[in-house]
Image (tube, rainbow, N blue to C red):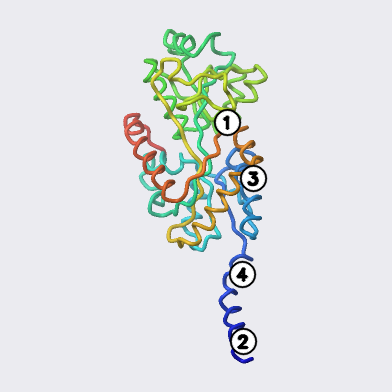
Amino acid sequence: MKRRQFSALAAASFAAPLAMAQERTIKILVGFPPGGSADVIARLMAEKMRTSLNQNVIIDNKPGAGGRVALQEVKRSAPDGLTLILSPSGALVIQPWLYSNLGYDTIKDFTPIALVSTFDFAVTAGPGAPAGDLKAVLAWMKANPAKANYATSGAGTVPHFAGQLLGQAAGVTLTHVAYRGGAPAAQDLIGGQVPLMVDTASETIEHHKSGKVRILAVTGEARSKALPDVPTLKEQGINMTADAFFGLYGPAGMGNEQVMRIDRAVAEALRSPEVQEKIYSFGLVPAHAGPAELASIQAAHLKRWEAPIKASGFKAE
């Protein structure tokens, strides 16, 4: 009897820390306001992860400084798997080349957990541009350099530099017009104040469907499932691509068991048809990869953007 009681007590004491950890809430930070693609994807993922982890998972929006506010909070957090971030790749692979002092190292200060989505960008013409395909619009811009402007959701973003690469590949000098977010950029595109916009398809896809604007190209290697009739840049003879991703990260120092447990929950969430359909509706692609592959993808993107950003001479304030 005593031996059985001792075994029961030992088992209970071993299980207690795990049970306590599972009772604690996981917080996924999003470095942008509610309603955007990062926020919507994070909330979908959290809903599915609650079930598979048997643990409460909430979203905490920490907008500011292009995602840097949220990343700084994650860096300062304990590596207990309770504070995570769903981050677009721009904050991790573009900003290190723009700021002399970010306050963190995007490789050393974070633990890669899971790739969630990949995406490319849409090149969209508004009523301020002439009719015709992308080549016709770019030819008009070349002939009218004072009007050769393109809008994006912000300076120092992937779309900013994707637009620069587009101009170089097409032999046209394009002037960047930065907005505080994709929505105001899209409104000025619709209003004719700027003729072209380069940003995620989610910013203009509904306006494209309604006929207010025209998505002329996507920047990926293949056509978007959300826009099957829109050709890629390469299909139109412009040898240029640009893509990005969303990844789930934690602070540096997380244990392997914690990481793999969360990664399995992400993989399960991404198998949900509901989650896949919603991600596709934003012009994104659901795509799972584990921590090692995510780290490799991040390193490759970081290296890829170094030369174009340095060549542009752009530095963040």
Residue 44 circle label: 3
For marks 1 and 2, give the one nearer the viewer. 2
Crowding near the residue tagged with mark 2, few <14, some 14–19, many ≥20 C-alpha atoms within 10 Å: few
Q: Position of residue 213 (x, y in %)?
A: 60, 18
Label 3 to label 2, Cα distance in Å?
A: 45 Å
At label 2, the amino acid type is Arg
User: Is there CB contact under 8 Å for labels 1 and 4?
Assistant: no
- Looking at the image, is 20 positioned above or below residue 85? below
User: Is there CB contact under 8 Å for labels 1 and 3?
Assistant: no
- Mark 3 vs 2, N-terminal side: 2
Label 1 to label 3, Cα distance in Å?
A: 16 Å
Label 2 to label 4, Cα distance in Å?
A: 22 Å
Residue 4 circle label: 2
Label 3 to label 4, Cα distance in Å?
A: 25 Å
Crowding near the residue tagged with mark 1, few <14, some 14–19, many ≥20 C-alpha atoms within 10 Å: many
User: Is there CB contact under 8 Å for labels 3 and 2?
Assistant: no
Label 1 to label 4, Cα distance in Å?
A: 39 Å
Which residue position holds label 1? Answer: 283
- Mark 1 vs 3, N-terminal side: 3
* Badge 1 element: loop
Which residue position holds label 4? Answer: 19
Q: Out of 275 and 64, give the one closest to the viewer.
A: 275
* Badge 3 element: helix
- Mark 1 vs 4, N-terminal side: 4
Q: Quadrant of the N terminus?
A: bottom right
At label 4, the amino acid type is Ala
At label 3, the amino acid type is Leu
